[in-house]
Image (cartoon, rainbow, N blue to C red):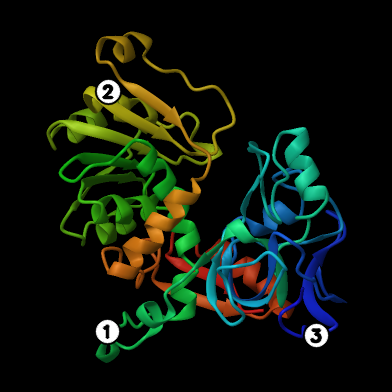
Amino acid sequence: MVSTILPPTHKALVLNSLTSPPSVQKLPTPQPTPGSVVVHMLAVNIPTYAREIYNGTRKYPFPLPLVIGTSGVGRIAAIGSDTTAFTPGQLVLIDSFIRARDDPTSAILMGIHQGNTAGSKTLMHGEWKDATYAEYAKVPLENCYALDEIRLLGGREEGGLGYKIEELADLSTLAVSYGGLADVAVKPGETVIVAPATGRFGSAAVKLAAAMGARVVAMGRNVEILKRLAENERVEYVPITGDIEAETAALKEFGPIDIYFDISPAAAATSSHLKSCILSLKHSGRISWMGGIGTDVGVPYGLFMHKDLMLKGKWMYSKENVKELIKMAEVGVLDLRNGAGSTTSIDTFPLENWDNAFTAAADGLGKGGVALFFP
């Protein structure tokens, strides 16, 4: 059943080919089916590398034509016949990491990547093909998370936190880093290395680890951003210099290191920090790797064995992780005002201005700028 009268058509940003740019088109408005809701999109994230995704540079697999997009914030516009917890008008976070209901190992990034299994390909070529750079999007029920609007958006005089809609959109960025930190069970009082810490996901990990009660040592090449992160009293920093021995010594100055969280980009495959961070860990230290390095990386085998080190890979996060993160924001433990941690500005764009939006997202890398669509 459709609970709200939806318009017959809506605007969406559609990619027809990797050799031609996306365009805003009028399409039939999606309708809710059992197991789904239709969401009126309010603020949608734009990855810094969005242009590289949709011009084929990154060679991500996805079907065409495609309504592109990713995670964001919106309001429930219409519900299906089996919806029991959501009501039209309700504020929700949309999670673009969709898992198959009968096989959670098959997963896609809606609007970005069809995954690596036959099952995940079925998801993106079928029911969950189109994404969120649109006025309306059909989303799996389990990928919608209720947000306490009064608490998050309400004024402080009313007991609220006074956030803006665009600040809530960064919850999806924070969720990625939280997935890795939670996976290695960060505890209050522990010391956590985050490397590299100067991008969106790295700075998010710095902010989260500190909010979880840890002392953080941020590593990176951009000293200006490292200093900005270190304005948090729980954050220290060590620059990445290419000198493994010097980096290791600097890290050990902070005493026993419990955890090394890594979210390196592909270009960091030979970076010195990959080894210096491992060498600095205490006995029984834990490592979480979440980055985008696509080549093999050597590890000191003997050190892992003798120091009982644990290395875990993590792609994205669990549904419980998202719920925990939202609760951290709602109770006020996690401050969303400066975004993922290094955010200095948020620029918003209509769908028609997608070219400038993609440029702004890329230009914000390393400068603290964030770009969002307001469809």
290 w.r.t. 25: above or below: above
**Is any part of residue 342 visible from this angle?**
no
Residue at 46% x, 65% y: name it.
170
Residue at 15% x, 44% y: name it.
189
Q: Which residue is mark 1?
A: 159
* Callout in the foreground (1, 2): 1
Q: Quadrant of residue 277?
A: top left
Discs 1, 2 touching: Cβ within 8 Å: no
User: Dividing the image into 4 quarters, which one contains the N terminus?
Assistant: bottom right
Query: Dot 1: what SS?
Result: loop
Packing grade of label 1 (10 A; few <14, some 14-19, many >=20) is few
Spatial distance from mark 3 to mark 1, Cα to Cα? 36 Å
Q: Which residue is mark 3?
A: 7
- Identified by mark 2, the residue type is Leu
Query: Dot 2: what SS?
Result: helix
Dot 3 or dot 1: first in sequence order is 3
Dot 3 or dot 2: first in sequence order is 3
Packing grade of label 3 (10 A; few <14, some 14-19, many >=20) is few
* Callout in the foreground (3, 2): 3
- Identified by mark 3, the residue type is Pro
Residue at 19% x, 40% y: name it.
190
Q: Quadrant of residue 301?
A: top left
Is 56 or 272 nearer to us in this picture?
56
- Identified by mark 1, the residue type is Gly
Spatial distance from mark 3 to mark 2, Cα to Cα? 59 Å
Q: Position of residue 354 (x, y in %)?
A: 70, 72
Dot 1 or dot 2: first in sequence order is 1
Q: Which residue is mark 2?
A: 279
User: Dividing the image into 4 quarters, which one contains the C terminus?
Assistant: bottom right
Packing grade of label 2 (10 A; few <14, some 14-19, many >=20) is many
Determine which of the numbered discs, if any, sits on residue 54 in the image: none
Spatial distance from mark 1 to mark 2, Cα to Cα? 47 Å
